[in-house]
């Protein structure tokens, strides 16, 4: 999960315009095919985790919460001036220990 989270944030910071097209829609209920494919991949992973007893919530809820969190973090990083982008924020949200305060 952490590797996928990091890949999501890293890719999207390198391609912010593409990310905004995928996740910054103003049409509720509509996502471009790439965003739907990303959710399907996440659901596959979470379904396996649930089958192994490693989820505390249903996979669909876990996917919703994960995508809400990673999208919010990424959009906040994209919206910040590059000099103010602190990717440790992303690490704190996904539960990765940080070696710096």
Image (spheres, rainbow, N blue to C red):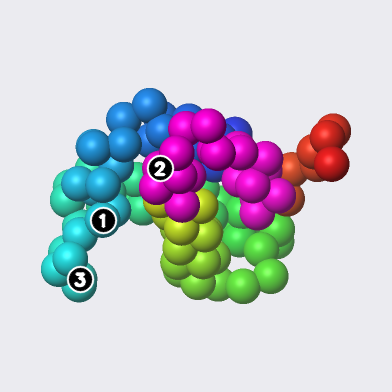
Residue at the (20%, 59%) spot, across then down: 25
> Any mark on residue 24, and which?
1
- On the picture, is 28 further left or further right than 56? left
User: How far is disc 3 from disc 2 in space, using C-alphas?
Assistant: 23 Å
The residue range painted magenta reads 76-94
Looking at the rendered image, the disc whose residue lies closer to the viewer, 3 or 1, is 1
Q: Position of residue 26 (x, y in %)?
A: 17, 66
User: Residue 36: in sight, yes or no?
Assistant: yes
Q: Position of residue 89 (x, y in %)?
A: 64, 47
Percent coordinates x, y for residue 59 in the rendering: 52, 65
Height in image: 30 above or below 2?
below
Q: CA distance from mark 2 to mark 1?
A: 11 Å
Q: Is residue 1 above or below residue 15?
A: below
Residue pointed to by mark 2: 78
In what element is the residue under mark 1? loop
Q: Which mark is residue 15?
A: none
Q: Is residue 8 visible?
A: no
Residue for badge 3 = 29
**Is the Cβ of the residue at disc 3 closer than 8 Å to that at disc 1?**
no
Q: Quadrant of the C terminus?
A: top right
Front-most of residues 60 and 12: 12
**Residue, x 85% and y 33% (percent of image)?**
99
Identify the element where label 2 is drawn: helix
């Amino acid at each position: 999960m952490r590797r996928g989270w990091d890949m999501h944030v890293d890719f999207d910071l390198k391609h912010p315009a593409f990310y905004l097209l995928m996740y910054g829609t103003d049409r509720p209920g509509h996502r471009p095919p790439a965003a739907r494919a990303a959710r399907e991949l996440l659901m596959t992973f979470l379904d396996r985790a649930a089958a192994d007893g490693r989820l505390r919530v249903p996979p669909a809820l876990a996917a919703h919460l994960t995508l809400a969190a990673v999208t919010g973090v990424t959009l906040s990083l994209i919206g910040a001036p590059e000099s103010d982008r602190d990717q440790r924020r992303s690490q704190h949200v996904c539960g990765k220990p940080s070696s710096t305060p």
